[in-house]
Image (tube, rainbow, N blue to C red):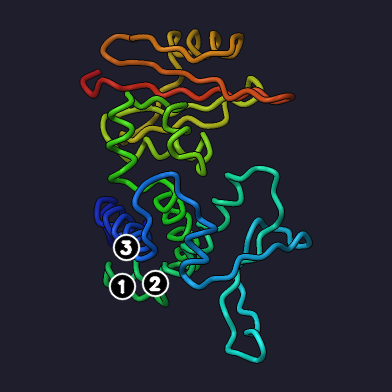
Amino acid sequence: MLPELTAEEFAAALESVAIEVLDAVGVQGPPIDALEIARAMGITVAWDDRQRGRGRCVRLGGYRGGPPRPTILLRPEPRPERRHWATAHEIGEQVAHRVFSLLGVDPREAAPNTRESVANHLAGRLLLPGEWFAADARACGWDLFELKRRYASASHELIARRMLDFPPPVIITIYDQDALTLRRSNLPGRVPSPSEAERQCRQRVHEGDGPDRRRDGAGVIQAWPVHEDGWRREILRTEVDECC
């Protein structure tokens, strides 16, 4: 976030630019196809299996000597979610200046990594637009699997992290191969260690194949297994009682 702005101002500008991009290309609801958005914006999408990163934007010579056109070069990825994320990030790079303009910030005076951060935030909002996502999430009780079915181009992790942008107060926890790899809350202050109820809920989905849901005091714990051959991931969403 830009240091002179509030989190609310920054988030509002990001949401505004993301929905502006989607409106301009006629996207009216999920799932979001980032590659089609790029093409609708006049950006060519091509593949480059030699590059190290997942995606980068360049300007290539136009057809028959025409003017250079922006082109997103993608590294071939087996997961479609990675292709969509890489493309959405590069679109974010292209429109990041709109965020700076809305906020009245000169990008030349921002920290060197600010544009990259803005592009990352925009990518998440392009694939999971705030107004749509919040309404769908509340309607399905924040069910990760249901949201994944609706927002198929976004990864499970991206969807889980996006839950932190909306009330109520929650903690998102991710385990990979039995190791805790992410634990983050949308409340200020130190995030507490997983409770016994959370550990039990996670263990149940780790050993089984289906999601689990249980109440812990005033909050609700939801857990989902994202299991594949050779890899076991569990994602938890824990509602937090602010009074505790």
Figure quadrant of the C terminus: top left
Q: Could you tell whether 8 is left or right of 232 in the image?
A: left
The label number, if any, that marks residue 180 in the structure image: none
Q: Position of residue 61 (x, y in %)?
A: 65, 84
Residues marked 2 and 3 touching at CB (< 8 Å):
no
Label 3 is placed on what type of residue? Glu
Label 2 is placed on what type of residue? His
Work out whether residue 160 can be spotted. Answer: no
Report the residue at 31% width, 72% height from top. Answer: 101
The residue where tag 2 is placed is 97
Give above or below for 61 relative to 106: below
Give above or below for 65 relative to 149: below
Residues marked 1 and 2 touching at CB (< 8 Å):
yes
Report, in whole angstroms, how far the alpha carbon at label 1 lies from the one at label 2. Answer: 6 Å
Q: Secondary structure at mark 2?
A: helix
The label number, if any, that marks residue 101 in the structure image: 1
Label 1 is placed on what type of residue? Ser
Q: Decide which of 101, 44 is in the foreground and name it.
A: 44
Q: Secondary structure at mark 3?
A: helix
Q: Decide which of 209, 166 is in the foreground and name it.
A: 209
Q: Residues within 10 Å of mark 3 (few under 14, many from 20)?
A: some
The label number, if any, that marks residue 20 in the structure image: 3
Q: Position of residue 89 (x, y in %)?
A: 52, 58
Report the residue at 38% width, 16% height from top. Answer: 221
Report, in whole angstroms, how far the alpha carbon at label 1 lies from the one at label 3. Answer: 14 Å
Figure quadrant of the N terminus: bottom left
Report, in whole angstroms, how far the alpha carbon at label 2 lies from the one at label 3. Answer: 13 Å
The first of marks 1 and 3 along the sequence is 3
